[in-house]
Image (cartoon, rainbow, N blue to C red):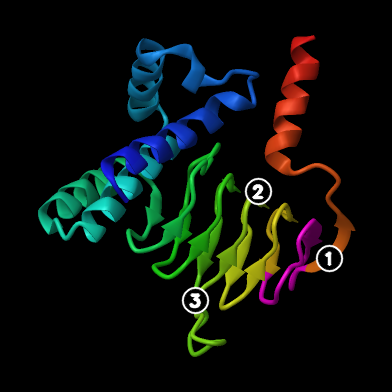
Amino acid sequence: MSPEGLSTTLLADLNRYYSHHGRDIVTEGRIAIIRAMTFHLIFSRGFRAIFCYRLRNHAEKKKIPLLGGLVGLVDMLFNSIEIHPQAKIGSGLFIPHPQCIVIGARTVLGSNITINQGVTIGASPGKEIDGQTEPVVEDNVLLGAGAKIIGPVTIGKNAMIGANAVVVKDVPAWAVAVGVPAGVVNKVEIPYHKLLELTSQRQIT
């Protein structure tokens, strides 16, 4: 990831913290972006953990172990979220309630993922399918509080995983999955990140 790509991705992450309030922070100018970035780095553990992950991931790719180690130390001291720097995560990650979240090393997350508190995404010992050992979560997925996504499973685009669900098999796109083990119970009509924006617009009007 180039520095330009890193900046663009971080801006997309930051914007998720504003988009559901009806704002597009990217269009508000450099001063507004700097203020927003500073505020969230100080007061938002969720965004701070994402920021640390992005820097550590960049350091891994550029083979700068000292930078990765220093950022990892800050991450460990100030955040209660464990995102492995080797995980592959698209832009627009949103962690609204940051507490006890674990994302494993070979996890792949798409863009505009929302992760609530208590979520674990990682491998199941001994399980592997076509070289995949950890979950693949496609774009625009909501992972509800306490959800566990375990092993080489794929969650399709725009799906919603309910609170405390345990996902041990694939979930199709546009599906709502709940339970232990998780099963499909409904169909998503509007992706979660868009639903947040629509709710915000209704409140404003």
Give the crowd class for mark 3: few <14, some 14-19, many >=20 residues within 10 Å: many
User: Which of disc 2 and disc 3 is earlier in sequence?
Assistant: 3
Front position in the image: 185 or 76: 185
Residue 45 showing in the rendered view: no
Residue 68: x %, y % from top left: 19, 53
Label 2 amino acid? Asn
Marks 1 and 3, how far apart in space? 22 Å
Mark earlier in primary sequence (1, 2): 2
Q: Which residue is located at x 33 percent, y 22 percent?
A: 38
Q: Secondary structure at mark 1?
A: strand
Amino acid beneath label 3: Ala
Q: Which mark is residue 123?
A: 3
Residue lying at the far bottom of the rendered structure: 126
In space, the residues marked 3 and 2 are separated at their CA atoms by 22 Å
Q: Which residue is mark 2?
A: 140
Horizontally, residue 155 falls left or right of residue 185, namely left
The location of residue 43, given as percent across then percent down, is 38, 26
Give the residue at mark 1.
184
> For the magenta stretch, what is the residue range?
167-182
